[in-house]
Image: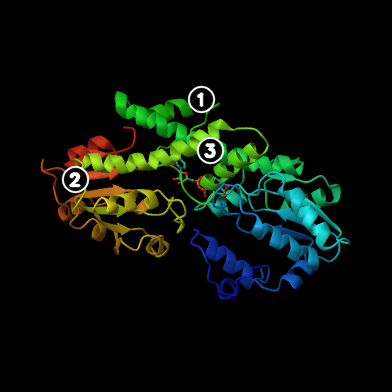
Amino acid sequence: MDLDQGKIDGLNNGKIPIYEPGLDQLVIRNHQAGRLHFTTDTAAAVKQSDVVFIAVGTPERRGDGAADLSYVFDAAKTVARNMDGFTVVVTKSTVPVGTGARVAEIIRQENPDADFAMASNPEFLREGSAIEDFMRPDRVVIGCENEKARAILKELYRPLYLIETPILFTNIPTAELTKYAANAFLATKIMFINQIANLCEAVGADVHHVSKGMGLDRRIGGKFLHPGPGYGGSCFPKDTAALASTAREHGESISIVENVIEANRWQKQRMTTKVRTALDNQVRGVTIGVLGLTFKPNTDDMRDSAALTILPALIADGATVRAYDPEGMEEAKEKMPDLVYCQDAYEACQGVDVVIILTEWNQFRNLDLKRIQAGMKARPDGRYLFCDFRNIYEPPTMVAAGFHYVGVGR
Ligand code: UGA
């Protein structure tokens, strides 16, 4: 259920409000088979349910970086007023430690007779590969100390997961903290390799080889060691900020995470500086072709995307930006109306002084480089400037093809 009538009407007509590969078929199939229903009628939805998942947004609160829990608490009140018989209330939203207890308190206040148990069941899927991640998770974490509720949740997940999928039962604060700790650790891994990448540039090393050499050590692991323009999205930026804020509230400091947040901000600025330097600090009057705007491929999500930091800075320097993104342009247009939005990659690179890759969509991995070059303006040395901030091309190939190639850490 959702309060947004437009969203529910759309879903009932097979219209998915976000872009996520495969989600449309999955939703339509189950909806048509009568296994999945969409409604704004909260009372009826809650009354029928043995388990209610609260999966509303928890945006970053302005000012202190803490998570804004107002949507979670509103949902809890609605659930409390309408539950009928023993109900397991699960927080699926990423919520700071202690929220489960506060939600239980709100439910008890709202409905002193409520027969319910609280559980925290954080979600670990990634946008763009949400279905695969959800169907084949490395683990399921459930914070719940009520035996009856644990049995219900175990039974709920049993048909979905392979026998070997570990289900970790903990108490609620542990499950809540596990989610933040996992995201903050992944963000730390990314920023670690980004800073190593920056050092690689200074010492003439290749960060891809460093990353591989590190990642083959099973204690480290090779994933999330890909350098780039810093992390974005709806999760890492807000979750790192919320974890740091929770620590401060409890008189603790997770200084590593504070540094990661700062390093991420700096990494995005560093990308802007790289473009300026490559243009000999003459940005005024320059035209820039940008490929990719979303915070990662296979999503239309622009939240905290590197593009939102880098492009306005270059426009303020006096550049004109032409851009193309396969799915993100609608949202991008609202956030950055000053860009010239194009129909495809080649149109975006037409007449430009420099091409910048900001998101590694598959369709940018095998561009017709001759065609790109033919539309570009050459630099004074006769070469064509190409900033690949996702490292999807090989530097020697690009140099041989006549480009002045700027990657990250190689
Ligand atoms: C992230 C986590 O990976 C999920 O496990 C978690 O469930 C989710 O947040 C959440 O809390 O809901 P997501 O933000 O969808 O998932 O996407 P990621 O694939 O983690 O990418 C986040 C950002 O990090 C992107 O901007 C991406 O480009 C960047 N990144 C990722 C790198 O720069 N390098 C890498 O090696 C990996």
In the image, residue 205 above or below residue 73: above
The residues bearing labels 2 and 1 have C-alpha atoms spaced at a distance of: 44 Å
Callout 1: helix, strand or loop? loop
The x, y position of residue 171, in whole percent, is 77, 41
Circle 1: residue type: Asp
Left or right: 319, with 377 as reference point: right
Which dot, 3 or 2, sits closer to the camera?
A: 2
Give the left or right position of residue 137, taking residue 19 as reference.
right
Q: Residue at x 75, y 54 (%)?
A: 103
Q: Which residue is mark 3?
A: 186
Rendered position, 396 above or below 56:
above
Assess mark 3: CB under 8 A from ligand 1?
A: yes
Query: Residue drawn 64% across and 32% down?
Result: 252
If you read the primary sequence from the N terminus, does the residue marked by circle 1 or circle 3 appear first? 3
Mark 2 lies on a secondary structure that is: loop
Q: Earlier in the sequence, mark 2 or mark 1?
A: 1
The disc label shown at residue 282, or none: 2
Image coordinates of residue 380 in percent, x first then y, are: 10, 43
Residue type of the residue flagged with mark 3: Leu
What secondary structure is marked by label 3?
A: helix
x 21%, y 42%: residue: 281
Residue furthest right as drawn: 113
Question: Disc 3 and disc 2: Cα gap in Å?
Answer: 37 Å
Check disc 2 and give the amino acid type. Gln
Circle 3/circle 2 CB separation < 8 Å:
no
In this view, the residue in front, 44 or 132, is 44
Asked if 271 appears above or below 28 in the picture, the reply is: above
Q: Earlier in the sequence, mark 3 or mark 2?
A: 3
Which numbered disc covers residue 217? Answer: 1
Of the 4 image quadrants, the one containing the C terminus is top left
